[in-house]
Image: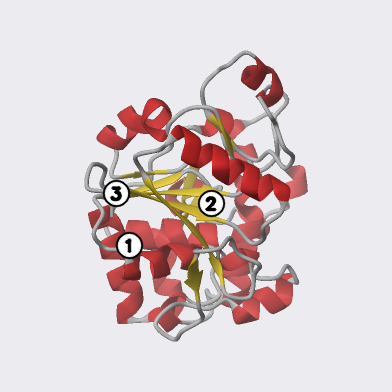
């Protein structure tokens, strides 16, 4: 552990391609005094020295959900966060960055004020209260007015809500409904130590209770069940797809962490 800085950075990745290595090198370049750990699942082609996440019964699994969505194990990247914390509990806070995140500044420059203000944050959140009863797949999302901010919100989360309805609401997991929420994307997430401690404790007490929940929804739901508020920060540069302004902003030296960018930017 770095004695000067009690922040741990988890660099989530699944291979050692040129983009992954380039962004990893930039992350280290701009954060020389921070402990940065490449993290990934054991069945992936990981950077040498990575924290390797193995399947074990102490953590949830998404076996049923993965078989339905046919998208590998992308629905359970949150397991990397819980597993890492179990092995590295000596830090004051934790910052999660995915491999397709380009940076041109230090974490402190971009997120320092937010880290002082919040116990945890992500770019976007949703809660069951805002989502509302009878929305999502319980109404035709194609009829929603996409010019209405609430309807856009409902449409965005209908996919997550669909799988919770399909797999979880008919089981004891329906008791999670009051806490149902989400944080996304799974890059540029921040947690103080006590936050991860509390959510990991909930998981360890009953890991099967959190099986087959999409990773973004599982994170948000457990956070709320543990008593924490979902906070939004950094959405201008953190989306599901690259935004039109990213390249221009980078060219103009606007400091930030830009996600996702899936090719190499040499600037």
In the image, 155 versus 85, the foreground residue is: 85
For disc 2, the marked residue is: 186
Q: Which is nearer the N-term, disc 2 or disc 1?
A: 2
Decide if residue 133 is in sight here.
Answer: yes
Q: Residue at coordinates 39% horizontally, 82% vertically from top-left?
A: 58
For disc 1, the marked residue is: 225
Furthest residue to the bottom? 57
Furthest residue to the top? 252
Q: Nearer the viewer, mark 2 or mark 1?
A: 2
Q: Which is nearer the N-term, disc 1 or disc 3?
A: 3
Decide if residue 180 is in sight here.
Answer: no
Q: Which is nearer the N-term, disc 3 or disc 2?
A: 3
Q: Nearer the viewer, mark 1 or mark 3?
A: 3
For disc 3, the marked residue is: 93
Label 3 and label 2: CA atoms lie apart by 16 Å
Quadrant location of residue 208?
bottom left
Q: Residue at coordinates 57% horizontally, 76% vertically from top-left?
A: 62
Quadrant location of residue 151?
top right
Give the percent coordinates (x, y) of residue 131.
Answer: 52, 49
**Quarter of the figure with the N terminus:** bottom left
Quadrant location of residue 100?
top right
Mark 3 residue crowding within 10 angstroms, few (<14) / some (14–19) / many (20+): many
Give the percent coordinates (x, y) of residue 90.
Answer: 23, 59
Query: Which structural element holds mark 3?
Result: strand
Image-based side of 60 in relation to 200, left or right: right
In the image, 160 versus 150, the foreground residue is: 160
Label 1 and label 3: CA atoms lie apart by 20 Å
């Amino acid at each position: 552990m770095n004695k000067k800085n009690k922040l741990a950075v988890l660099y989530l990745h699944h291979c050692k391609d040129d983009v992954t290595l380039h962004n990893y090198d930039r992350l280290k370049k701009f954060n020389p005094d921070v402990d940065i750990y490449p993290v990934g699942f054991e069945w992936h082609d990981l950077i040498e020295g990575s924290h390797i996440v193995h399947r074990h019964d102490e953590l949830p699994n998404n076996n049923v959900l993965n078989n339905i969505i046919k998208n590998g194990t992308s629905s359970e990247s949150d397991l990397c966060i819980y597993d890492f914390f179990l092995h590295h509990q000596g830090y004051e806070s934790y910052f999660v960055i995915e491999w397709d995140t380009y940076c041109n500044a230090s974490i402190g420059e971009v997120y320092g004020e937010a880290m002082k203000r919040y116990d945890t944050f992500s770019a976007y959140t949703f809660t069951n209260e805002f989502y509302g009863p009878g929305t999502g797949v319980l109404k035709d999302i194609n009829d929603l007015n996409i010019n209405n901010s609430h309807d856009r919100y409902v449409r965005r989360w209908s996919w997550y809500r669909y799988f919770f309805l399909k797999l979880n609401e008919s089981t004891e997991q329906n008791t999670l409904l009051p806490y149902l929420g989400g944080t996304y994307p799974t890059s540029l997430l921040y947690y103080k130590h006590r936050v991860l401690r509390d959510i990991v404790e909930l998981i360890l007490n009953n890991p099967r209770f959190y099986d087959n929940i999409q990773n973004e929804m599982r994170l948000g739901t457990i956070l709320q069940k543990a008593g924490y508020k979902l906070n939004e920060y950094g959405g201008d540069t953190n989306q599901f797809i690259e935004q039109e302004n990213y390249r221009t902003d980078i060219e103009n030296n606007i400091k930030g962490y830009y996600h996702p960018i899936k090719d190499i930017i040499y600037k």
